[in-house]
Each structure stands twice: as C-alpha cells, then as structure tokens.
Image (tube, rainbow, N blue to C red):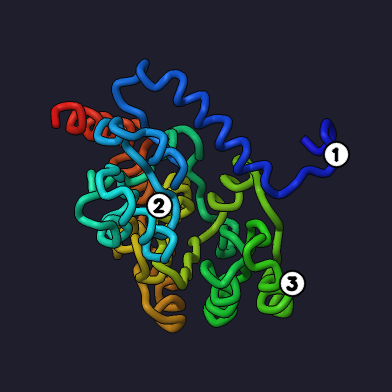
Amino acid sequence: METTHGTVPPSIPAVLEAARMEDLRLRLDEFDIVHCHGEFFHAALLGERRRHSLTTIHWRVDELDRAIFFETFPDLPVAAISAAQGAMLPASNRAGVVHHGIAEDRYAPGDGAGGYLAFVGRMTDQKRPDRAIRVADAAGRPIRLAGTIDVGNPTYFEREVRPLLSDAATYVGPLGDTAKGELLGGAEALLFPVDWPEPFGLVMIEAMACGTPVVAWDRGSVREIVEDGVTGFVVSSEEEAVAGVARARRLDRAGVRRRFEERFTAARMARDYLALYHKLLEA
C-alpha cells in the first residue's frame, strides 16, 4: 500500500475493517452462521443475527476493553481458544472451547540434533525472551531466538534482550514457515517462558509438530496444551525450567509428534467448530 499510496495514516486498518464489515452487511442473509475473528465492530453490525454467529478472540479477554465489550453484547457467542481464556469470559458469552490446530503436513518432524534450545515469539515482557536466555545459560545450552520486535513494547528488546545476546545466545529475527520448522526441528526443546495469561500459544503446537518438547511456564493455557512428562514440562521457575531442559532429551520425539497429530491438527479444529455451528443453529 505504501508503494501505491505513499505514507498512509494510522487509521487505515480501522477503515479497511469498516469496509469489510460493509461487505458483510450487504451479504448477511446469505449465511447460516457468521464466524468472525475480529473483536469489536462486527458485534453491532450483526444485530439480531448475533445468536447465529460465532466470535473467536485471539488475545487475552480480561482487560477493560473486553469487559466493556462483553457488557454491551452479552448475547454474542464466543468460542474460547482455551479453557483458561474461556474462564475469563462472562457466562452468557461462552459458546465452547476450540483449541487451535494447524495442517498436519505444515511442519516435518525433526531429530533435535542441533544441540540448542529455541525461543520463538514476540520480543516483549509478555513472552520473556530474557528469561529464556537465562535458562539456557544455566542449563549450559546455546539458544536461538526468533520473532519480531513487539510494536507495542519497542524498547524491550534493546533494554532487556540485546545485552544478554552472545555467541551462545543468538537472535535470528522473524522467520517464515520453512525456517521456523528447521529451527524448531533441530532444537532439543522449545522454551516458552510466558509471563501473562497466555490465551493459547500457537508456537507450542508448532514445536510439537516437529517432535520438539516444550518447557513452558504454568500460565494461562499452558497446562491444557503441554502434557507434563509427555510433550514437555510445565514449570513455575527458572530453576524448574533448567531441570525440564535436562529431562526433555529423554522424551520420545515421535511420541510428541503423535500427540500433536491426535490433538492439534487443523482437521480436528474444523470438526470442533462445525459442532459449535450446529449447536448454535439448533438453539
């Protein structure tokens, strides 16, 4: 867009969302169920059709903006992406829980022979890459960190992460799917040291798809996603995480991949959403 229009105002995303909502309004009668992955504008547009709609929110739902939203639209059915997220929703909005899934062939199993740990996520205090570096150092492992500089917390990387980088702790920047699969597949384990009520944590199932165990902090959805002692370890401190890293080598990577196939494929996710659609139509 910048090539075509030059510098654009920051309101452009909101304008484009309004334009898509107009597209939806003009075709609303064509659909049995309208499933929205936005968070706000669509609820007013749907009006009486709200009871035959479903909303998926991909962020935390315990802050003031969502509280006002749900108070205004108590009849909007919401599919939580984890039970932890769903517990924060008002009872009147809870339509069910559908864990995320990804295509079964999106990532290939890896052998974990790279001899390093991996961190994949936004460079922010919610994801805590600094904590991951400290755990790797204490565990005597090199670590490779991938992800974007968080636009909502742009100084965090320079202040908290860059001073910890070294030959043993390298930042490789944002990665596409192929490079991410290679990074995860070669890692002994993924560190997921979150410090917020994680709504889901997609990278955990991406790691599992590669057969890579996950060592994750017990926040938000983590205990729903990671099966302790099977697909990784759920921890509450850096000391526990160091012990988890040592134990991760002994987990069966084929078994980690198998649990991904059983629990977190896109096909399973689609079946779960279809079941919710039918439930809404029958109601």
Image quarter where the C terminus lies is top left
* Quarter occupied by residue 133: bottom right
Amino acid type of the residue that numbered disc 1 sits on in the rendered structure: Gly
Badge 1 marks a residue whose secondary structure is loop
Closer to the observer: label 2 or label 1?
1
Disc with the residue nearer the chain's start (2 vs 1): 1
Q: In the image shown, does 103 or 244 lie closer to the viewer?
A: 103
How far separated are the C-alphas under marks 1 and 3? 40 Å
Disc with the residue nearer the chain's start (1 vs 3): 1
- Of the numbered discs in the image, which one, if any, rests on residue 167? 3
135 sits left or right of 25 in the view = right
Q: Can you identify the residue that label 1 sits on? A: 6
Q: In the image shown, does 168 or 277 lie closer to the viewer?
A: 277
Q: Is residue 249 above or below residue 131?
A: above
The residue that appears at 62% across and 70% down in the rendered structure is: 142
Badge 3 marks a residue whose secondary structure is loop
Q: Is residue 127 above or below residue 135?
A: above
The residue that appears at 74% across and 72% down in the rendered structure is: 167
How far separated are the C-alphas under marks 2 and 1? 49 Å
Q: Residues within 10 Å of mark 2 (few under 14, many from 20)?
A: many
Q: Is residue 21 above or below residue 181?
A: above
Q: Can you identify the residue that label 2 sits on? A: 253
The image position of residue 135, as x and y in percent, is 53, 77
- Of the numbered discs in the image, which one, if any, rests on residue 89? none
93 sits left or right of 167 in the view = left
Task: Using the rendered image of the protein, determine whether residue 230 is visible from the camera's viewpoint.
Answer: no
Q: Residues within 10 Å of mark 1 (few under 14, many from 20)?
A: few
Closer to the observer: label 3 or label 2?
3
Closer to the observer: label 1 or label 3?
1
The image position of residue 119, as x and y in percent, is 56, 62
Amino acid type of the residue that numbered disc 2 sits on in the rendered structure: Arg
